[in-house]
Image: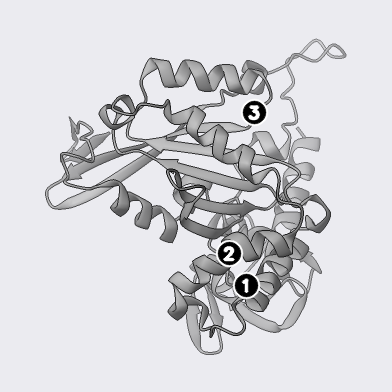
Amino acid sequence: MYKIEHNNADKVEAVTFSELDMDESEIEKLLRCNIKMLCGDEETMLIVGQQFMIDKKNICDLIAVDKNGSIVLIEIKRDPKDINARNEPFEFQAVRYAASFATIKDVNEFVEKVYVSYIEKYPDEFKSDERNRLELGTKKLKDFLKKNSSSNSFNKKQVIIITASDFDERTLSSVAWLNSNGVDISCIKLMPYKINDDIFINTQRILPLLEYDDFYTKISDKTPRIKKRKPSIEGTQPLRVKEMLQEGIIKPGDEIVAKDDNDQRGILLENGNVEVKGKVKSINNWLKEYYGWSSINSYHFAFHSEKNKTLDELRTDFLDNKYENL
């Protein structure tokens, strides 16, 4: 990272969480409230558990359900020295946790065993009483799965995310081997930087690696000139709301509604926010608050009234047309 001032670029070195006097519980709290740091703005994830006791000796840091209906186990370590100090390898502990969740058969069992205790821990966020926690948790999780078209794929797969400020070679080697043998496990670095009194955290996915083919530009066999390949939407950087406004895909004054609920309406503003019932909010925050989820792919759940498509469908159509004309 570089700090730019008066055309001078001064390199800012990363520090460790221990140097910032941040313990694992503080990192855990940060991620719980800002899960997009791990999954990105384009992903949708519902946090359903924190400090969940697997057995008498083992506790999972965070548990979530992703847009595919997979149970996600998130394990947190501050720095490499904390990983090395463990008796059991960090990554294999997470695999054992994932294996224990593979036995859960349905939503009701999962809510009763996991989600209810999380709701009890944060009553102000859920505004529930003791009588309806199970009912509320079941409804929220089933609504989440239904909205993401993953009701029939709940817990068909378990996903593991391990995170630290850096990883030792032993951990990376083990995770790479697990990846190659079909285990969905990721290493994500959270690299903290301190500039004056401000703390910045850069996130970087280390594993699994992208395939080299994702970066190659192919040469057409049909023409003598080099033709740009039409990239898949998954392989390109998606357009943000501000870019969609600049491209004329959407415009200020357009009405945006929450997917499948026409009563939740907002008016798009020039800066990419929406005005909902007299309050200005980002589309992401508005939809997260409405659905009650920890993280949301707002482009998938923001629906353009006039064009009768989601923002994701509109930007996909735009990119399709753009690259067809190249």
- Per the image, the residue denoted by label 3 is 183
Up/down of 104 relative to 139, above or below:
above
Residue type at mark 1: give it: Tyr
SS class of the residue under badge 2? helix
- Per the image, the residue denoted by label 2 is 115
In the image, 15 versus 278, the foreground residue is: 15
The quarter of the picture where the N terminus appears is top left
User: Dots 3 and 1: beta carbons under 8 Å?
Assistant: no
Q: Residue furthest bottom?
A: 278
In the image, 209 versus 309, the foreground residue is: 209
- Per the image, the residue denoted by label 1 is 291
Residue type at mark 3: give it: Val
SS class of the residue under badge 3? loop
Q: How many neighbours does mark 1 have within 10 angstroms: few (below 14), some (14-19), or many (20 or more)?
A: some
The residue mark sitting in front, 1 or 2, is 2
Relative image position of residue 285 (x, y in whole percent): 51, 69
The quarter of the picture where the C terminus appears is top right
Up/down of 90 relative to 29, above or below:
above
